[in-house]
Amino acid sequence: MKKTICALLLSTALGATPARAYKAYVSNEKGNSITVIDTDKLEAIDTIKVGRRPRGVELNKEGTELYICAGDDDAIQVLDTKTLKLTGKLPSGPDPELLALSPGGDIIYVSNENDNLVTLIDVKRKEQIGDIPVGVEPEGMAVSPDGKLLVNTSETTNMAHIIDTQTKEIVANILVDGRPRFAEFKKDGSELWVSSEVGGTISIIDPQKRTLKQKISFEIPGMSKEAIQPIGISITRDGKRAFVALGPANRVAVIDAATKKVEKYLLVGQRVWHLAFTPDEKYLLTANGVSNDISVIDVASLKVVKSIPVGAFPWGVVVAPQ
């Protein structure tokens, strides 16, 4: 024990930071389960049975509760991350797909694919507190860092709907390319990135001016445009680099977020859906729906370092401190 304490004190004195261990949670859409991954060991350590067709997942601020969109159960299930037991559910509309939390963690915004609504849920009261009509087949959800703007993307209407969270009204409808699936703000709130699966592009939106700034397209030698389908987006905390999951192209695009140029493509598992950084941004995890695994990308070296088997058809992934 004394040797351990001495070593820790010495490493701190030398400026070293002890390694952090994190847990990742993966929703398996066809397995009706959540796989838990230890990101230090880079291996799956548990599987929890949940509701039918789990897709979007999100953690509360403390990392103590995991919220799961159980689409075919028309509910948001709540998983205690310490006991790994389901503790209840929150009311949503039909077929919840993706969700986002307010910066304070007190409100959940849910896209309900079948009724063209975004549902607002009070986390503490476990009650619906409102609905916002949006376009056809709503999916992507994002909240601005200051909590003032909510964004929903509608797959069939092909729009990003910008909503004022105080008035709960749409303040702008921005047309993007076909089948927008995901939205992500830069951490400073200066840009909103929206992926269009069928259109094969990323739309960069100025959320203050509420205008489309530019688009990013992708080209992979020997691959048809139809196979390159952008879905999930993750942007580094410093806003310098973005990663985009390209679906059946089985690749993640690495983008210089300043120049908007693609730096390289990383080969991952089959049908890559969504992405999540570990909190220290050492790793980026990708959920690969057809190969039933998670690819682990080393962010510093931009190399895929491991594949971790999970459940059937992994869809969403989030990471929290252990």
Image (spheres, rainbow, N blue to C red):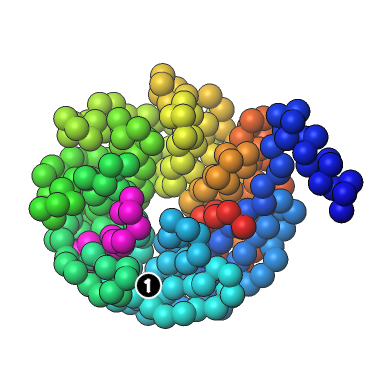
Residue 132 in the image, given as x and y percentages of width and height: 15, 61
User: Which kind of residue does numbered mark 1 sit on?
Assistant: Ile
Residue 209 seen from this side: yes
In-front residue for pair 302/8: 8
Residue shown at the point (29%, 61%) measured from the top left: 107
Query: Where, by quadrant of the figure, is residue 68 drawn?
Result: bottom left
Span shown in magenta: 102-118
Residue 219 seen from this side: no
Is residue 49 part of the magenta span, yes or no? Answer: no
Residue shown at the point (64%, 49%) measured from the top left: 295
Left or right side of 9 for 215? left
Is residue 106 part of the magenta span, yes or no? Answer: yes
Which residue position is annotated with label 1? 76
Residue 252 in the image, given as x and y percentages of width and height: 54, 39
Secondary structure of the residue carrying tag 1 is strand
Q: Image quadrant for the C terminus?
A: bottom right
Question: In the picture shown, does residue 206 fall above or below 93?
Answer: above
Residue extending furthest front?
Answer: 2
Residue shown at the point (17%, 57%) measured from the top left: 134
Left or right side of 156 for 52? right
> How many numbered badges does the structure rendering display?
1
Left or right side of 123 for 301? right
